[in-house]
């Protein structure tokens, strides 16, 4: 593409928008990021801390393979941003993660499907790792060596600091319109007062739930209003100060995150604090569009912790006292097949309009990969995923090309 035309606008400065912006800016694009909120972390990416960890399944299914590619992309970016001085040891840690298999939860591989000793990603957890987690000997567990805890807001800020990215905070996009003028093809973005915010040849909607509303405004005689099936999945994480726990409990905290029934992370600073905190999450609640912090969700997280790490239950109880416990809640934005929607929605009727959303419960693991997919496609580079995996992320799976815009030979 002509360097003069390598300009793009991204709506939304969460993990999805920041990842696309960084992937494109690294390739020489000028990227404008428009964010409705006055500060970063307004949406789900305001999560205090989360995990980038592989998904393991008995048949190494599509989700497992996509998640490994995603975690790899996230870790590579975190390493790169650390080398550049934009992230540091307080922002993320490649500690590895122990997955405790809880009876009745998702099955881990058995028989031949058990990860091999030499598997770079996951192995059966060693006696020492199980002991370090404080679990009884012979507890069924896997060890994911390529897995990290990460503070999403810090990753967002670091990616948006990439040269070539311009961030405009407090810039809510109310409506998008398409221009067909020969000299001015592209997309116009408008605010609630009808003021033009930007005009751009290429547009990425990374605006979580608002993506559906912005698409719905694009009425077409053949498509009708564009419907995009995003759903909210509310979640709450509970956390507290490590130094407020009893001394014996502090000594028993696992030196790495443990997941398998929610996840437990300790020794990480909470937003706005210097001190080390512990975190247990998260709740899952469908069809709830509000995200206030609730005491019943702290209780649910305490039960979750007691199941995940029973030996910690008693010692952690004081941390859940009303004057100790803190919380953060947000809305995960999911699609029916639980995978993101990435790339052009339909290149014939809506050229230049890309999506990067529907990260669900895996934005840390998948957003950088999604950013790389969009950047590679705009640069004409090879898709980062094999075709049999790539099709599962393509935004086009939700938007069928109308028959009339296909050539006669293609019509079915
Ligand atoms: C409790 C909880 C725990 C989680 N734990 C993990 C975990 O351990 N690992 C993991 O990988 N993921 C986890 N997730 C999921 C992860 O947080 C999300 O997948 C991710 O943050 C989604 O990023 P996003 O950029 O798509 O959305 P968001 O972060 O919501 O960003 C969207 C942005 O777009 C902006 N915006 C919206 N509309 C407009 C508009 N019209 N104009 C301009 N800007 C607009 C919003 O203000 C917002 O900043 C968790 C989520 C929750 C709620």
Image (cartoon, helix red, strand yellow):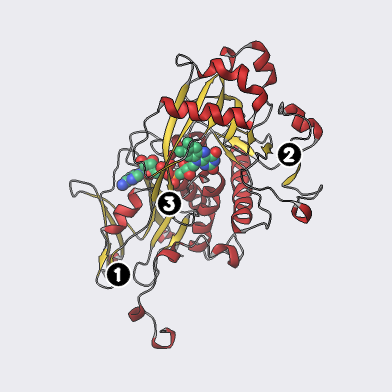
SS at badge 2: loop
Rendered view: 146 above or below 7: above
Give the x, y percent position of residue 91: 57, 31
Binning the other alpha carbons within 10 Å of mark 3 as few (below 14), some (14 to 19) or many (20 upward) gives many
Viewer-nearest of labels 1 and 2?
2
Numbered circle sitting on residue 30: 3
Callout 3: CB less than 8 Å from ligand 1: no
Rendered view: 100 above or below 327: below
Viewer-nearest of labels 2 and 3?
2
Question: In the rendered image, which quarter contains the C terminus?
Answer: bottom left
Identify which residue, 120 or 245, lies in the foreground: 245
Name which residue lies at 36% across and 41% down. Answer: 288
Q: Decide which of tag 2 and tag 3 comes sooner along the chain.
A: 3
The answer for how far apart the CA atoms under marks 2 and 3 are is 49 Å
Give the x, y percent position of residue 49: 53, 32
Identify which residue, 205 or 360, lies in the foreground: 360
Numbered circle sitting on residue 140: 2
Residue 191, can we see it? yes
Rendered view: 328 above or below 339: above
Which residue is denoted by mark 1 in the rendering? 223
Q: Are marks 2 and 3 in contact (CB under 8 Å)?
A: no
SS at badge 1: loop
């Amino acid at each position: 593409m002509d360097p003069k035309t390598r300009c793009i606008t991204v709506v939304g400065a969460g993990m999805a928008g920041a990842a696309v912006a960084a992937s494109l800016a690294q390739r020489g694009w000028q990227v404008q990021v428009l964010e409705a909120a006055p500060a970063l972390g307004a949406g789900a990416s305001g999560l205090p801390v989360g995990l980038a960890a592989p998904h393991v399944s008995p048949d190494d299914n599509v989700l497992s393979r996509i998640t490994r590619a995603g975690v790899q992309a996230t870790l590579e970016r975190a390493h790169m941003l650390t080398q550049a001085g934009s992230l540091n040891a307080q922002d993320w840690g490649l500690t590895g993660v122990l997955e405790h298999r809880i009876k009745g939860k998702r099955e881990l591989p058995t028989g031949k499907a058990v990860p091999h000793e030499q598997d770079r990603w996951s192995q059966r957890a060693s006696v020492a790792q199980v002991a370090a987690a404080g679990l009884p000997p012979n507890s069924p567990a896997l060890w994911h060596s390529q897995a990290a805890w990460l503070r999403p807001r810090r990753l967002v800020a670091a990616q948006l600091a990439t040269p070539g990215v311009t961030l405009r905070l407090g810039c809510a996009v109310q409506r998008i319109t398409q221009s067909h003028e020969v000299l001015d093809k592209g997309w116009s973005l408008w605010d609630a007062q009808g003021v033009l915010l930007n005009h751009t040849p290429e547009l990425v909607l990374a605006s979580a739930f608002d993506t559906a509303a912005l698409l719905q405004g694009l009425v077409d005689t053949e498509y009708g209003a564009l419907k995009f099936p995003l759903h909210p999945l509310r979640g709450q994480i509970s956390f507290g100060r490590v130094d407020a726990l009893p001394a014996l409990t502090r000594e028993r905290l696992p030196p790495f995150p443990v997941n398998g029934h929610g996840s437990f992370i300790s020794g990480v600073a909470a937003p706005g604090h210097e001190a080390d905190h512990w975190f247990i999450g998260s709740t899952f609640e469908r069809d709830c569009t509000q995200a206030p912090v609730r005491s019943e969700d702290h209780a649910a997280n305490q039960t979750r912790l007691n199941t995940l790490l029973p030996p910690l239950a008693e010692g952690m109880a004081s941390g859940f006292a009303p004057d100790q416990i803190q919380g953060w809640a947000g809305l995960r934005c999911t699609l029916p097949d639980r995978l993101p929607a990435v790339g052009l929605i339909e290149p014939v009727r809506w050229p230049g309009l890309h999506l990067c959303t529907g990260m669900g419960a895996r934005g840390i693991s998948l957003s950088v990969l999604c950013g790389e997919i969009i950047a590679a496609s705009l640069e004409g580079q090879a898709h980062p995923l094999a075709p049999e995996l790539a099709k599962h992320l393509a935004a086009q799976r939700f938007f069928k090309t109308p028959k009339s815009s296909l050539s006669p030979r293609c019509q079915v």
